[in-house]
Image: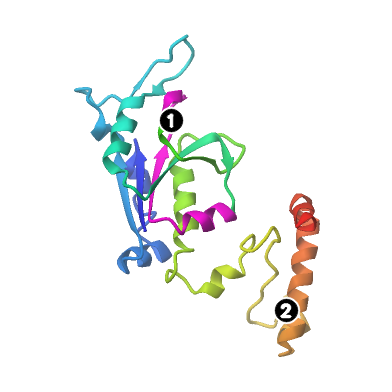
Amino acid sequence: MKIDILTLFPNMFDGLFSESIIKRAIENKLVEINIINFRDYSLDPHKKVDDSPYGGGPGMVLACEPIYRAIKDLKKENSKVILLTPDGSLYNQAMAKDFSKEKHLILICGHYEGFDERIRSFVDYEISIGDYVLTGGEIPASVLTDSIVRLIPGVINDESFSEDSFYDGPLLDYPTYTKPKEFMGMEVPEVLISGNHQNIAKWRLEMQIKKTQERRPDLWEKYNDK
């Protein structure tokens, strides 16, 4: 897979993809990640990519032309273009699974007061990572990249993500424990050291249901509607 990230602030990604799982995925040539400053596609002598909004108002608005030129240069037949925007569809694990099957993703990081509405005409998806305001699309782009790359075959063991929260439905993950067996009076549940895998699986599902009911009743409602 290839991921191109279009941003005004490439340095925000320094170090982010040079550690841990994503670093190994890049080294093993399972993914190629390119950070591209779309000022490079500006025809303005000062590489300007924004301007004041028509009709007045505060802030600056990202212009169409640099982003259009970048997409035109990068996009291939199998590319999907994603705009990171607060009014996009709310991102979830199902989307991550779908995107992990694509060959080429182009992520556009918004910034400033917003972007020229006509930019929407050149994208395939508009994605939001939550109902809150960030300074730009760099953090959402990082979230998408991390959640997608870990699902690419060969990046991590299939079992590692197949038991994640949300992977195969809206249930939260079950509690996990490691040594020591007892810590400050808190003990590991006996079922987990019983060796009975059927009982362990049953207990884990019960804990998933209990945790989801208590912490995320909205997800529990979705689970019941399946």
Q: Is residue 98 magenta?
A: yes
Q: Residue at x 55, y 68 (%)?
A: 161
- Which comes before the other along the chain, label 1 or label 2? 1
Please tell me in which quadrant of the rendered image residue 41 appears. Answer: top left
Q: Amino acid at mark 2?
A: Ala
Residues in magenta, as a range: 93-119
Residue 97: image x %, image y %? 53, 58
Q: Is residue 146 left or right of residue 37?
A: right
Q: What residue did someone put label 2 on?
A: 201
> Dot 1 surroundings within 10 Å: few (below 14), some, or many (20 or more)?
few
Numbered disc 1: secondary structure = helix
Q: What residue did someone put label 1 on?
A: 121
**Camera sees residue 206:** yes
184 in relation to 82, above or below: below
Please tell me in which quadrant of the rendered image residue 173 appears. Answer: bottom right
Q: Residue at x 76, y 79 (%)?
A: 189
